[in-house]
Amino acid sequence: VWLDGQCVNHLLDTIDQHIVLKLNDIRSDFTLQAQFVVETYMVQRQVIENGIVVEEEYTEVLCGTDTLLSAFWPDDCYSVERVRYNGTDTVVLDAYSFNNIHQNILLQIEIKKNRYHIDVQSVVNCEISSGTLSNDYECGDNATYVFTPAEGYYVQNIVVDGVQLPADDHYDFVGIHADHTISAVVAQYMYQLQCEVISGEGSVEPESAMLP
């Protein structure tokens, strides 16, 4: 604020949110000039993983304007667990619209890495093991399961998510992005017994048989 060309900001007072300049003992004409600027506010977006800010962006906006903030995290191995608006929990949406802004805004988006489970189904006469203590994995992990049939048995088919696959001694899950099941079809080795008479008269019944 200028009075007759001189800055008088040091004389300003605030009453009921109004800026007031008190002039006392006026003895002549004077010129009063004022320059007004639009207030600005800071819109801040934070992405937090395990309590650590992994991404942060700031946008300065003019008072009374609108803005749109995204809460979507593009990595498909992550999901949004919690969203806070100026310290208060709010519903989880893909994006947030703020209209007629009259305050600073802090949008905090807490994300977590997805975890998946591999259900190892029990198979008689065959052990299925990954060699780890848990069958829970973070998204994107790899896991190998080994089939160990009991003596006298063999793996006829591998079964993953209900689909039969060719037999093998192991199966690799690569880049895990979902829950899975794993099992096997196990069969017993069978051997043919062939019988025949090599001398004298007589017969053998049966002449052949399949035995385990």
Image: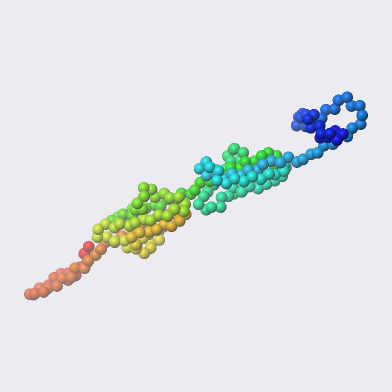
- Looking at the image, residue 85 sits to the left or right of residue 16; the answer is left
Residues 27 and 15: in front is 27
Q: Quadrant of residue 64?
A: top right
Q: Is residue 172 positioned above or below 15 on the image?
A: below
Q: How many marks?
A: 0
- Looking at the image, residue 17 sits to the left or right of residue 69; the answer is right
Q: Is residue 28 positioned above or below 59 on the image?
A: above
- Looking at the image, residue 98 sits to the left or right of residue 32; the answer is left
Q: Position of residue 6 (x, y in %)?
A: 84, 34
Q: Residue furthest right?
A: 28
Q: Is residue 198 positioned above or below 169 on the image?
A: below
Q: Position of residue 86 (x, y in %)?
A: 62, 38
Q: Quadrant of residue 172?
A: bottom left
Q: Residue at x 27, y 57 (%)?
A: 150
Q: Residue at x 59, y 44 (%)?
A: 46
Q: Residue furthest front?
A: 6
Q: Position of residue 163 (x, y in %)?
A: 40, 61
Q: Residue at x 52, y 44 (%)?
A: 49
Q: Quadrant of residue 90?
A: top right
Q: Position of residue 161 (x, y in %)?
A: 41, 57
Q: Quadrant of the N terminus?
A: top right
Q: Residue furthest left?
A: 200
Residues 103 and 37: in front is 37
- Indicate the colouring scheme: rainbow
Q: Quadrant of the C terminus?
A: bottom left
| Any part of residue 178 in sight | no
| Any part of residue 74 in sight | yes
Q: Residue at x 57, y 46 (%)?
A: 55
Residues 207 and 52: in front is 52
